[in-house]
């Protein structure tokens, strides 16, 4: 679902099929009316253009850098996709630990 949302916003396409992890899940899926043989299209997976996708790198990867720490803070790389406009934003953010300490219950 997450990949389908990102691809919808970027103008891509995806297909997939439901997969049951065991016989009980297969039985419950059939009882709920799911068809495990049907090939699901983009419109089956994400039926609206009104969709957002956001990801922030935790560790380095092909698409995003992981969190990078420095003296009194950290920087992060994020990707934000808006389906309605097809806008894709790549955001590098700097987070100051001294400021976060005053706003958060989390101990930095």
Image (cartoon, rainbow, N blue to C red):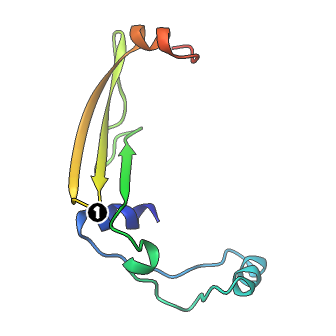
Instruction: Determine the residue positioned at 73% across, 76% down.
Output: 25
* Residue 27 in picture, x, y percent from top left: 76, 84
Question: Within the image, what quadrant is residue 68 found in?
Answer: top left
* Residue 62 in picture, x, y percent from top left: 29, 50
In the image, farthest residue toward the bottom: 37
In the image, farthest residue toward the right: 24
Question: Within the image, what quadrant is residue 75 found in?
Answer: top left
Q: Which residue matches tag 1? A: 9
> Is residue 64 visible in this depiction of the protein?
no
Neighbour class for label 1 at 10 Å: few (<14), some, many (≥20)?
Answer: many
Instruction: Determine the residue positioned at 35% across, 36% down.
Output: 66
How many circles with numbers are drawn on the protein?
A: 1
Q: Is residue 98 left or right of residue 86?
A: right
Relative to 67, is 16 above or below?
below
Along the line of sight, the residue nearer the viewer: 56 or 11: 11
> Is residue 23 visible in this depiction of the protein?
yes
Relative to 58, is 70 above or below?
above
Q: Secondary structure at mark 1?
A: helix
Instruction: Determine the residue positioned at 39% across, 67% down.
Output: 4
Relative to 44, is 79 above or below?
above
* Residue 39 in picture, x, y percent from top left: 46, 88
Instruction: Determine the residue positioned at 33% across, 46% down.
Output: 61
């Amino acid at each position: 679902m997450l990949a389908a949302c990102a691809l919808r916003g970027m103008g891509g396409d995806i297909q997939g099929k439901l997969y049951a992890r065991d016989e009980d899940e297969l039985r419950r899926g059939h009882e709920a009316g799911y068809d495990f043989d049907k090939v699901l299209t983009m419109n089956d997976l994400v039926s609206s253009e009104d969709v957002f996708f956001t990801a922030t790198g935790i560790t380095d990867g092909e698409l995003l850098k992981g969190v990078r720490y420095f003296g009194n803070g950290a920087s992060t790389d994020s990707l934000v996709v808006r389906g309605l406009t097809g806008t894709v934003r790549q955001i590098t953010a700097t987070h100051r630990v001294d400021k976060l300490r005053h706003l958060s219950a989390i101990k930095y």
